[in-house]
Image: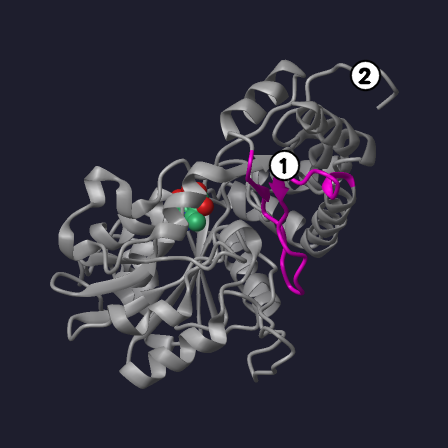
């Protein structure tokens, strides 16, 4: 972008990657069109194999959405009515919604200040005799503290379902120089189940809805394959053994995702480079608290905390300069009336409640250039004078 550029800056630009990959995408889409097979065919099977190998898991099951991956994952783990599932108080609604759809009760635990993720030190006190699972979310692409979560799960014999909707390609590393045998593992390969979303804005995004369940457990994979197709056994088509769903991944999305999977590491590196650039450009603005650059973080979003300046004022300043910005999320889950009851909120969530008032996500995509980041920073810097 040239100096003095006043063109609006969107929250994200998906068209750049389409242009970059046009010949490969065209070939993939036409291949499906000509094949005559459009749902759960060879592209889905190949994609499942490729993702399983990328993530380092035994099974990958292609589904209709990340929400379905959570619901089907919970059900395949045997979670249902009467069970409690411990999860973060700060996530997209679907995380909690899926628990309710599975028939269980979400129990919200507050988040850590540094990571926006569930605080493992608060989990133990939320465990009751009804607790069956922990559902951490790797929010904004930063892995949750899986070493501590897995230790707790082992101690209390709980299942772990990772919500990886925002963390495709992220790797876990333990904190503070301590080491763990989980170091370097992909998110989604650590718990009993990893649930992924391929909504177009995600780090690996389809051109429609899509999702996937990852697991090393043969029984969970088999149940998930049944649940995605009306509870029918894969071998005996019209023998419905379970009440399932129509949650099949289609061939077009799988073919597109196969093309994009080859580029996801490079794009995640682009996201990390963009985050470093934002860090440089925003470091002088004392009213912003910037996210930490930690190993394995894939920056689904670049989300700052607005401290000392009302968020609304910054949003208006950005809007006035034609710069998009978003709030992910304006309410913590424990405060949403549809989800709130005494027993659903373990101990209050002051950090999540405060973050819901302070978080601000800035324009961000893998190919965002330095001059765009400089323009966003300049629009925010205007606040300095106030
Ligand atoms: C944290 C989180 N969980 C679950 C979902 C649900 O995924 P989907 O939109 O594919 O159903 C999303 C994304 O929208 C998400 O961000």
Q: Left or right? Give the position of 363 relative to 338.
A: right
Position of residue 345 measured from the top left corner of the image (x, y, whole percent) = 23, 55
Judging by the rendered image, the residue that carries numbered circle 1 is 30
Neighbour tally class for label 1: few under 14, some 14-19, many 20 plus, Cα within 10 Å:
few
Which quarter of the rendering shows the C terminus?
top right
First along the sequence among labels 2 and 1: 2
Q: Is residue 221 visible?
A: no
Give the vertical position of 305 relative to 139 (above or below).
above
* Left or right: 250, with 262 as reference point: left
Instruction: Tell me which segment is drawn in magenta.
Output: 281-308
Q: Are marks 2 and 1 in contact (CB under 8 Å)?
A: no
Nearer to me, 103 or 359: 359
The image quarter in which residue 125 lies: bottom left
Magenta residue check for 286: yes
Question: From the viewer's perspective, is residue 281 above or below residue 136?
Answer: above
Q: Looking at this rendering, what residue extends furthest in the left direction?
A: 82
- Residue 371 left/right relative to 330: right
Residue 7: x, y in percent? 74, 15
Q: Main secondary structure of the magenta part?
A: loop
Residue 12 against residue 40 in the figure, above or below: above
In the rendering, at what x and y percent does residue 346 appear? 23, 60
Q: Nearer the viewer, residue 45 or 257?
A: 257
Q: Foreground mark, 2 or 1?
A: 2
Q: Is residue 253 above or below residue 117?
A: above
Q: Secondary structure at mark 1?
A: helix
In what element is the residue under mark 2? loop
Quote the CA–CA distance across marks 2 and 1. 38 Å
Q: Is residue 332 magenta?
A: no
The residue that label 2 is drawn on is: 5
The number of callouts visible is: 2
Q: Nearer the viewer, residue 244 or 372?
A: 372
Q: Is residue 381 visible?
A: yes
């Amino acid at each position: 972008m040239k100096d003095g550029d006043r063109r609006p800056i969107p929250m994200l630009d998906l068209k750049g990657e389409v242009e970059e990959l046009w010949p490969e995408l065209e070939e993939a889409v036409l291949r499906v069109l000509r094949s005559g097979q459009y749902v759960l065919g060879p592209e889905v099977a190949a994609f499942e194999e490729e993702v399983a190998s990328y993530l380092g898991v035994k099974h990958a099951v292609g589904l209709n959405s990340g929400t379905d991956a959570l619901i089907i994952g919970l059900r395949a783990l045997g979670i249902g009515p009467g069970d409690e599932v411990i999860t973060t108080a700060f996530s997209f609604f679907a995380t909690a919604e899926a628990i309710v759809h599975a028939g269980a009760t979400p129990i919200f635990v507050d988040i850590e200040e540094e990571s926006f993720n569930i605080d493992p030190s608060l989990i133990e006190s939320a465990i009751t005799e009804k607790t069956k699972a922990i559902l951490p979310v790797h929010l904004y692409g930063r892995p949750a503290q899986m070493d501590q979560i897995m230790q707790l799960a082992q101690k209390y014999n709980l299942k772990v379902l990772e919500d990886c909707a925002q963390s495709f390609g992220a790797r876990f590393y333990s904190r503070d120089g301590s080491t763990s045998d989980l170091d370097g593992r992909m998110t989604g390969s650590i718990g009993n189940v990893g649930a992924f979303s391929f909504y177009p804005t995600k780090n690996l995004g389809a051109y429609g809805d899509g999702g996937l369940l990852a697991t090393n457990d043969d029984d969970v994979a088999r149940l998930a394959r049944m649940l995605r197709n009306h509870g029918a056994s894969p071998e005996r088509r019209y023998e419905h053994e379970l009440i399932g769903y129509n949650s099949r991944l289609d061939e077009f999305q799988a073919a597109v995702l196969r093309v994009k999977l080859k580029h996801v590491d490079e794009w995640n590196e682009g996201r990390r480079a963009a985050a470093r650039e934002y860090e440089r450009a925003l470091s002088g603005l004392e009213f912003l608290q910037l996210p930490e650059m930690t190993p394995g973080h894939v920056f689904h979003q670049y989300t700052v905390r607005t401290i000392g300046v009302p968020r609304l004022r910054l949003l208006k300043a950005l809007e006035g300069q034609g710069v998009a910005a978003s709030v992910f999320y304006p309410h913590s889950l424990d405060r949403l009336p549809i989800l709130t009851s005494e027993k659903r909120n373990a101990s209050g969530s002051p950090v999540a409640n405060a973050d819901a008032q302070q978080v601000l996500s800035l324009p961000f995509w893998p190919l965002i250039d330095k001059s765009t980041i400089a323009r966003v920073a300049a629009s925010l810097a205007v606040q300095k004078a106030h």
